Image: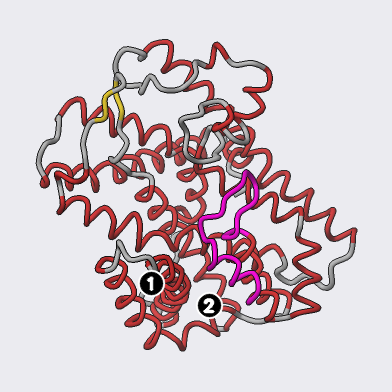
Amino acid sequence: MSGDELQSKTIDFLRFPLIVGVVFIHTDFSDIVMKGVKQISFVNYPLFSHTFFLFSKVIFEVCVPLFFFISGFLFFYKTAGFSMEIYLQKLKNRVRSLLVPYVFWNLLVIIFLLLAQTFLSGSLVSGRNKLITDYSLLDWFWSFWDTSQINPHSKKSLPVNSPFWFIRDLMVVVLFSPIVYILIKKLRTYAVIILGLLWMFNPFFYLPGLSTVSFFFFTAGAYFSINNKNFVSGMRPMLSIALPLYVLLVVAQLLFLNKSWWVDLYCAGISIGLIATVSVVAHFIGKESWRPNLFLANGSFFIFAYHRLPLVFVIKFLFKLLKPQSEVLLLFLYFLCPVIIIVFGLMIYSFFKQLWPRFTAIVSGGR
């Protein structure tokens, strides 16, 4: 298997498990509010809280940075130079693959929220958010960019379809891609190092459309493409070092959670975790033990786009039905809810793809 083929198959294989990780990140029981009442407190369930932290706050935290890395790599992949003509063509392509799905899925969530606020206001909705029927023209704008401007209690600057902060920030990085290209051409590895240090000093810096994580990992991926380097071939030999080191970093993050320097472990865990993830997948694909499933790879964007709101309602419905008050039941729900959402999403994707293939391709960014 050639290096380019292994790289392509590794990227295709990663798409689905990374989306599974994103769904688990959002399977958060810490702030489930119904009728204004918070349902559980994590301090009462130490086993569940540690399991949740291990997966959703440590292991799966590598998923989004790795997506930014792959996006940066693919944006400049096999691009000879970077003229204004190439830049405009790439922007045109990203309108189809990013902007159109961004507008569609955010608008769809607004419609569903409107229906929920109208028909479920007494049961499954939190009651904390401004009613969509009361939105001003400016509120409609902010709902596509930063809902904290509408609902002041919100702690994060997210669009109404919250996972799409990734697409929002990616679109902004793409707009700045000529600067990324110039930095890499002029400074080479120093460009990646400088942005990496900025990320490490403030990994949780998020302004609407601007985040250190997006610029650093997009640039890191772009570095390989611009310099015609195969990142899979570079990372695969590091398996024997990266994997055990990553395990140690995961354990350290669990043991030293309350230490002031935990953020350093967090950044190291993501960086080494990215290398470990790529090297493990490349290792097994190279041995032909694993192979990418094109249906799962192609359906990954649909799962990403649709999952957030159905996941919230599934969690609230099961909490209302089962009223979990034990560690075992909470752990069961923590793993059950993502499975329900992912399986159901793949069924919907398959159904839509058969009945409306053109429409499905449009709302999935041409995927």
Q: Position of residue 314 (x, y in %)?
A: 30, 32
Three-letter code, disc 2: Leu
The residue indicated by pointer 2 is: 6
Question: Dot 1: what SS?
Answer: loop
* Residue 241 vertical placement versus 32 (above, below): below
Q: In the rendered view, does 314 fall on the left or right side of 274?
A: left
Question: Dot 2: what SS?
Answer: helix
Q: How many marks?
A: 2
Q: Nearer the viewer, residue 172 or 85?
A: 172
Q: Does the magenta portion include 195?
A: yes
Q: Position of residue 210 (x, y in %)?
A: 64, 51
Q: Does the magenta portion include 112?
A: no
Residue at 67%, 38% (x, y): give it. 100
Residue at 10%, 46% (x, y): give it. 328
Residue at 62%, 39% (x, y): give it. 101
Q: In the rendered structure, which segment of residues is drawn in magenta?
A: 193-214
* Residue 127 vertical placement versus 32 (above, below): above
Q: Looking at the image, which residue sits at the far front?
A: 260
Res 266 quadrant in image: bottom left
Q: Earlier in the sequence, mark 1 or mark 2?
A: 2
Callout 1: 10 Å neighbours few (<14), some, many (20+)? some
Alpha carbon separation for disc pair 1 and 2? 11 Å
Q: Looking at the image, which residue sits at the far right?
A: 84
Residue at 15%, 47% (x, y): give it. 45
Three-letter code, disc 1: Trp
Q: Which mark is residue 290?
A: 1
Q: Position of residue 327 (x, y in %)?
A: 12, 46
